[in-house]
Amino acid sequence: MSKTIIIIPSRMSASRLKGKPLLEINNLPIICHVVKKAKQANIGEVIVATEDKEIIDAVESNGGKALMTKNHRTGSDRIYEGLKKIKANDIDYVINLQGDEPLIDPLDIINLNNLMIKNNADIGTLAAEIKKNSILKDKNIVKVNTKEKLNNKNFSEALNFFRENLSTKYLNVYHHIGIYIYKVSILEKFINFEQTKNEIKNRLEQLRALDNNIKIKVGLAKFAPIGVDTKEDFLAIKKIMEYK
C-alpha cells in the first residue's frame, strides 16, 4: 500500500503579509488551522517545516509536529529538507500543503491523494471552477488550463499556469489551489533543477516542472478556498470562520 506524508511549509517573512502564519482566527493561529485540516484528512503524518522558532512553538503548543529548516527559496525546497530530516524510507508520496489555506477541504486532500495513487502520476494538484469573471483578472489568483474539462473522476494534464488574464487563448481554465503531491523520486528530481526564467518571471514554481517536461495532473476540487495573501484576505477568512 502506498504511503503519503503531508508537509506544510511555513515562514514568517511572507512578502505581502508578514507574520501571517501566527495571525489568529477563533484564538488559533492560521498555521494551526491548516494542520487541523490536514489531520482531518487522515492519510498520513502531518508536519510543519519552517525556519522560524515562533511557528514551531505555536504548532507544538497546539498539539502538532514541526521541524526547523534552513531559509529556502521555495516551498518545495523546504518540504524536501523536511522529508530528509525525518529519515523515513517508506514514504511514496509527499503532499505540499500551503500554510495559508485554512479553508482547504479535507475531502479534497483525500481525493487528490487517491487520484495520484490510482493514476501513478508524478505530480498532482487541485483546481476549482471559476464562477466570477473578476477572478480571471486578479493577478493574485493563479489559474491553470487543462487538456480536458475537469470532472469529479478524471485527472487531467496541466498545460499551463498563469496569473494574467489569458482566458481568451485557452479552454478549460480553472482556479488553481495551493496544494501539490509529489512522488518522492520526482520531488528530488524537481528540486535539483535550476529555477527557470518562466518560473521567475511569473513567480510560479510549478512552471519549473512543466519547463523540464514533468507532467502535472489536475483534479477537481469542490470549491476554491480563499488563501491568505493580503490583509483583506485575512479579514475575509476571519469573518467566514468566526461566523461559522
Image: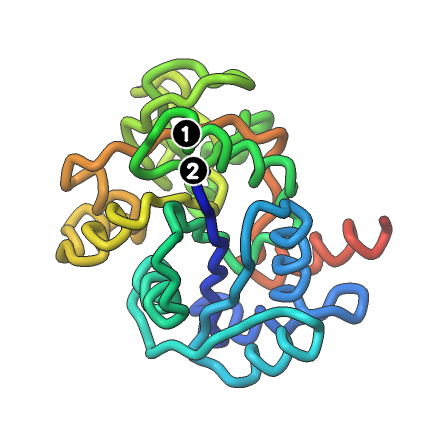
| Label drawn at residue 125 | 2
Residue 53 coordinates in the image, percent (x, y): 51, 85
Sequence-earlier tag: 1 or 2: 2
| Residue 202: percent from left, percent from top | 28, 48
- Residue in view at x 54 percent, y 25 percent: 129
Q: Amino acid at mark 1?
A: Val
Q: Nearer the viewer, residue 89 or 13?
A: 89
At label 2, the amino acid type is Thr
Separation (CA) of disc 1 from disc 2: 5 Å
Which color scheme does this rendered protein use? rainbow
Residue 77 shown left or right of residue 131 in the figure: left
Displayed quadrant of residue 137: top left
Q: Residues within 10 Å of mark 1 (few under 14, many from 20)?
A: many
Q: Secondary structure at mark 2?
A: strand
159 or 168: nearer the eye?
Answer: 159
2 or 26, nearer to the observer: 2
Q: Position of residue 48 (x, y in %)?
A: 51, 67
Quadrant in which the N terminus is drawn: top left
Query: Do residues under tags 1 and 2 come within 8 Å of each other at their CB atoms?
Result: yes
Q: Residue at x 25, y 48 (%)?
A: 185
* Tag of residue 218: 1
